[in-house]
């Protein structure tokens, strides 16, 4: 059993709770759509000011966790960092509704490896030249 599974069992959090909380957190809504349109307008106008100066934060992804992602996290399978971050946000949201303190990423995924993506083409070419 992994640390995430034991943590969820001890706090009484189900995978369904995580999926619902993640979908609520990651939904765009009016604020997210507004930020996306403002960031696009900034890129079109070629403003020299950075996003932070203009008060344009990065919007949420717009896509919550799926049941498969939650079950993979509970089974301690390697997950991409964005999925692990969504799991963390969902767990903290559920804990906040239960009026409990937030938890850190290391506490949930201690000992779990990160999923490795595909190597960039330049790195593949360099590796082939060495052979």
Image: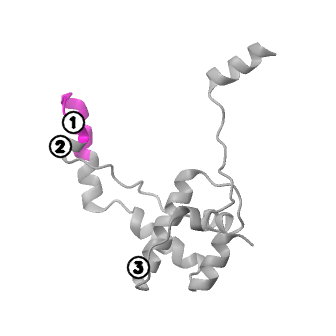
Q: What secondary structure is the magenta-colored segment mainly? A: helix
Which residue is more in the foreground, 109 or 91?
109
List x then y, in percent, for residue 10. Answer: 61, 84
Give the colour scheme of this rendering.
one colour
Q: CA distance from mark 3 to mark 1?
A: 35 Å
x then y, percent, for residue 86: 50, 61
Contact flag, marks 3 and 1 (Cβ < 8 Å):
no
Label 3 or label 2, whichever comes before in sequence order: 2
Structural distance between the alpha carbons of marks 1 and 2? 9 Å
Residue holding disc 2: 54
Q: Quadrant of the N terminus?
A: bottom right
Question: In the shown orientation, is residue 110 left or right of residue 41?
Answer: right
Q: Are marks 1 and 2 in contact (CB under 8 Å)?
A: yes
Q: Which corner quadrant of the image does residue 73 belong to?
A: bottom right
Please indicate whether residue 123 sits to the left or right of residue 64 in the image.
right
- Whether residue 120 sits left or right of residue 77 in the image: it is left
Residue depicted at x 66% and y 32%: 119
Q: Which residues are magenta?
A: 37-51
Residue that label 3 marks: 96
Residue 124: image quadrant is: top right
| Residue 40: in magenta span | yes
Q: Helix, strand or loop at disc 2?
A: helix
Q: Nearer the viewer, residue 24 or 95?
A: 95
Q: Is residue 118 above or below residue 55?
A: above
Mark 3 vs 1, N-terminal side: 1
Depicted 37 relative to depicted 107: above or below = above
* Residue 50 picture location, percent across and down: 23, 36
């Amino acid at each position: 059993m992994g640390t995430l599974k034991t943590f969820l069992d001890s706090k009484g959090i189900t995978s369904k709770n995580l999926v619902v909380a993640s979908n609520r957190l990651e939904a765009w809504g009016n604020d997210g759509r507004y930020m996306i349109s403002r960031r696009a307008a900034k890129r079109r106008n070629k403003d020299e000011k950075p996003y932070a100066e203009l008060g344009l934060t990065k919007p949420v992804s717009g896509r919550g966790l799926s049941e498969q992602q939650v079950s993979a996290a509970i089974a301690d399978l390697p997950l991409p960092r964005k999925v692990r971050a969504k799991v963390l946000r969902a767990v903290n949201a559920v804990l906040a509704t239960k009026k409990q303190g937030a938890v850190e990423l290391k506490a949930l995924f201690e000992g779990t490896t990160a999923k490795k993506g595909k190597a960039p083409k330049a790195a593949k070419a360099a590796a082939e030249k060495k052979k």
